[in-house]
Image (cartoon, rainbow, N blue to C red):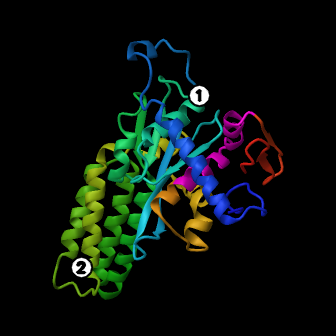
Amino acid sequence: MKDILPVGERYNASTIRNHLCHVAKRQEAELAEKPDYLSGCPRDWAALPKPGKPMVVGIDGGYVRNRNDKKNHFEVIVGKSYSDEVPAKRFGFVQKIDEHPRKKLMAQLTSQGMQANQQITFLSDGADNLRELQFSFYPESRHVLDWFHITMRLTVLNQYAKGVEKSDPAIGAVLSDTLESTKWYLWHGNVENALENLEECTLLCDDNELNYFNRKKLLTHLDEMYTYISNNRMIIPNYGEMYRYGETISTAFVESTINEVVAKRMVKKQQMQWSQQGAHYLLQTRTSVLNDELKEQFRRWYPGLKIDEHIGEKTDESTGLAA
């Protein structure tokens, strides 16, 4: 636990786990009392002081091994919000467990000084489970499909195209050129032409005479890519223009947040198994630590708390509770 939370070695794992759950439940109880909407009247928002620079919120998901269903994983949602003028903050939750995800995000943005008339850009992978969290959240918000996830899908298709070239060079060359053209259409926000190109790729490969052993898998990936782009066509901007103006077009910065929040113990290194409730509680406390908010929460909850700035030396003299 000391790799995840600021705790010392003198507390055993059961003590830390029980205290962590207690802290997370209290954090969740406070959150339940906060609004999930903007206060005030929309007519008055224009009269607010000039807002700061636009804010960016990146949201992505990671997968954790399920303790109760060992053959499967469950998804945790992790995000980061920041601007050029405001330090970054993180948030995380297990969607099936969290009853107040919008309140969580609203509270975080409010703590960063977000105004109702301030521009905000949401970047995500376009997953259906994130739509409710993002849309109708802020009147000045813009929603952008993450370029990183588009290029990942195109990279998979290009790998298949190289395989086709080995078995049928002529068709493989046409397929590679069409996919490259699709990439540039999407880069410039030309969704219609990109979809037409994907249809051409499907017609090209949907030929029983094509001697490629992975043809069915390739067709499946092309169909998934077409559906993905079609479903998210309203949030595909002109990425080239955004890039030239220095705007964020990728949630690659959220990948580092996932590594900060969940990777070492929960996913990549030790392959621990988690219950959904346990993972959710850990995410609440872990993000509080990363946002440097845990100390202030304990000072508010326990006025008699004396906090040694050295990690792991936090106790309340009146309760004996380890922070």
Q: Residue at 30% of width from left, 62% of height from top? A: 225
Under circle 2, the secondary element is helix
Which residue range is magenta in the image? 281-303
Which secondary structure dominates the residues rendered in magenta?
A: helix
Q: In the image, residue 62 lies at what x, y percent?
A: 48, 61
Quarter of the image for residue 5 reads: bottom right
| Residue 128 or residue 264, whichever sits in front | 264
Upstream in the sequence, badge 2 or badge 1? 1
Q: CA distance from mark 2 to mark 1?
A: 51 Å
Q: In the image, residue 6 lies at what x, y percent?
A: 73, 54
Near mark 2 (Cα within 10 A), the count class, few <14, some 14-19 or many ≥20, is: few
Specify the amino acid type for callout 1: Gly
- Quarter of the image for the N terminus: give it: bottom right
Instruction: Work out whether 46 lies above or below 22.
Output: above
Q: Viewed as shown, does residue 125 lie left or right of 257?
A: left
Residue 23 appears in the figure = yes
Q: In the image, residue 257 lies at what x, y percent?
A: 58, 54
Q: Residue at 67% of width from left, 48% of height from top? A: 289
- Whether residue 102 is in magenta: the answer is no
Q: What mark, if any, has residue 216 been given in the picture?
A: 2
Q: In the image, residue 190 lies at what x, y percent?
A: 32, 48
Quarter of the image for residue 72 reads: bottom left
Q: Select label 2 or label 1 by which is in front.
A: 1
Q: Viewed as shown, does residue 136 lie left or right of 77?
A: left
Near mark 1 (Cα within 10 A), the count class, few <14, some 14-19 or many ≥20, is: few
Quarter of the image for residue 2 reads: bottom right
Specify the amino acid type for callout 2: Lys
Under circle 1, the secondary element is loop
Residue receiving disc 1: 113
Residue 253 appears in the figure = no
